[in-house]
Image: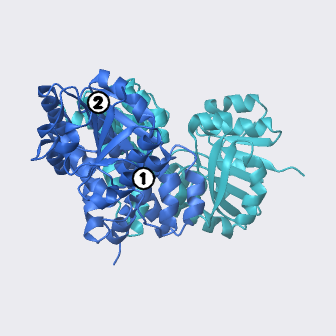
Chain colours: A cyan, B blue
């Protein structure tokens, strides 16, 4: 008997991901804070539920991909939340980038309901969601991971099991920490180049193929050179992620000065009213730092 | 008539580069602070000169690749230096990573002697020098660059002209600034992962193919995971480069907080007695920062 999937969260990422499941022939139930954003899925045959609670009552697997940790908390633990309607044996999957400690709390609560939990944040952005090429970092119940992998293949590509509940989120934090440092290096190099009156694109031609080479240099640096700050991934979402990483690091008594600097610089970007620009807008804060 | 090349500097980088020129059939004269380090070139038929001055007297092209800016200054401007023996029409090439402002001074002095100058620092390390796959970033006299390119093909691959004298050095600084930020991001991600009890190699499997992807993650992070801090590029040389970049940035009234942080952390690595380890040893300073 085929499993019924409950899907909560139909934003930029969630909507195309859920469509991939529908297209693969799965029965998908759907809930979202704003119903209109789920319309294309309803039109494609998904059954709409007004609350996570109601959706939980009639789903075997529940996948969430929402916004901020507080939203995730409300959807799982809140009034009319998932845990108020969940059936024993349900597999819960949270694909939001959220706190590893929250992933652990959900896993503990799931067990009380004789359910299992997987934290499975993704990387690859809206493009990856649309093209079905997301990287999925998984933590939690290994048996459930093995059960869910065939579903994930509908939108995922590089899918790696990282360990117990929270390990998926911790891995995503490692991803964001690496990007934070890389972005500082690339944007500082660009501003140095500009001040030294180099041609930015010619400079990039020299440095992008060697030991400085990185995705940020290949994809985002040419955008900066072209004065293009449109979002692939938004500053305000990155600030959320950096905040989670810093909080988790502090809980582990870990001092990460580069990450702290990155967050401060991104707050400066946000203060400039550029919170909804792409992460390459870090360049703008650095530029302002050395302007009259 | 074929040109005679004077080569000054037969260290880890210079020696294999000069050998490539000899192997390509060029007449190469050689000078080095320590004669024994040039022995393999002398054995291969290069004529030895005791001072840069003497070498300059009988060379049409002079290529230098030395250590620190002060060494470069001495070799060009010092007693028995290149300028004390140079012939009009000589093409001077400095491949040392040094100060853009020094490159400009050499160019000005060269002109007084009716000579031309190219700054052409490289990236790619000892391996690149041995395999003849160096990236060469060139600034200075464009006509001379065009003349010298056929020679550079003996050891270079990605060769890009960046503009007037100093532009090659500025581009190399952009390369090092990018690496500094990337290295902070990667090492902080690794230490976070270790503290969060992730398996480092499994974590790297998740993050290395997406937006966090970079050369440092591919090549150096697995070494850190394996506790291998042997140098590809040495901490003390990187400190020199970061110092040059910060000094040049300050001269341009440019504030680069990430670069400044990187230098401080690398000074901490050096203080631990790890100055001759590879740049990935940044991890060790971060580790100590959060140890009892």
Q: Quadrant of the N terminus of chain B?
A: top left
For image coordinates 33% across by 52% down, the residue present is B10
Q: How many marks?
A: 2
Could you say which quadrant of the image residue B91 lies in? Answer: top left
Query: Residue B188: image x %, image y %?
Result: 41, 59
Quadrant the C terminus of chain B occupies: bottom left
Q: Is residue A86 shown to the viewer in this render? A: no
Q: Tag 2, which secondary structure?
A: strand
* Residue A278, quarter of the rendered image: top left
Query: Residue B126 has which mark?
Result: 1
The outermost residue toward the left is B79
The answer to whether residue A167 is left or right of residue B52 is right
> Badge 2: how crowded within 10 Å, few (<14), some, or many (20+)?
many
Please name whichever residue, B110 or B45, is drawn nearer the observer in this view of the structure: B45
Residue for point 33% across, 46% down: B176
Among numbered discs 2 and 1, the one appearing first in the sequence: 1
Q: Which residue is mark 2?
A: B139
Q: Please state the horizontal and vertical placement of residue A2, each as a whole percent of the image.
A: 87, 49
Characterize the local packing of mark 1: few (<14), some (14-19) or many (20 or more) Cα atoms within 10 angstroms: some
Foreground of the two, B271 or B17: B17
Picture residue at 67% right of the left edge, 61% below the top: A117
- Mark 1 falls on what kind of element? helix
């Amino acid at each position: 008997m085929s499993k019924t999937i409950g899907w909560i969260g139909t934003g930029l990422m969630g909507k195309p991901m859920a469509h991939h499941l529908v297209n693969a022939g799965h029965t998908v139930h759907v809930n979202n804070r704003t119903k209109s954003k789920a319309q294309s899925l309803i039109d494609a045959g998904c059954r709409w539920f007004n609350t996570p609670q109601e959706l939980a009552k009639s789903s075997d697997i529940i996948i969430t991909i929402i916004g901020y940790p507080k939203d995730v908390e409300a959807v799982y633990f809140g009034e009319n939340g998932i845990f108020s309607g969940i059936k024993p044996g349900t597999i819960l999957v949270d694909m939001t980038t959220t706190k590893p400690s929250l992933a652990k709390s959900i896993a503990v609560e799931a067990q009380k309901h004789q359910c299992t939990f997987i934290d499975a944040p993704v990387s690859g952005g809206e493009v990856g969601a649309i093209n079905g090429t997301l990287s999925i970092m998984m933590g939690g119940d290994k048996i459930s991971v093995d059960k869910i992998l065939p579903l994930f293949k509908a939108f995922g590509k590089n899918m790696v099991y990282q360990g117990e509940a929270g390990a998926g989120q911790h891995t995503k934090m490692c991803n964001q920490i690496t990007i934070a440092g890389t972005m500082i290096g690339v944007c500082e190099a660009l501003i140095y180049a500009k001040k030294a009156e180099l041609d930015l694109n010619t400079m990039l031609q020299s440095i992008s193929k060697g030991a400085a080479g990185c995705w940020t240099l290949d994809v985002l640096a040419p955008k900066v050179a072209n004065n293009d700050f449109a979002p692939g991934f938004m500053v305000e979402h990155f600030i959320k992620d950096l905040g989670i990483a810093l909080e988790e690091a502090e809980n582990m008594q870990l001092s990460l000065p580069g990450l702290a600097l990155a967050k401060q610089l991104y707050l400066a970007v946000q203060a400039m009213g550029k919170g909804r620009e792409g992460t390459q807008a870090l360049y703008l804060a650095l530029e302002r730092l050395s302007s009259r």
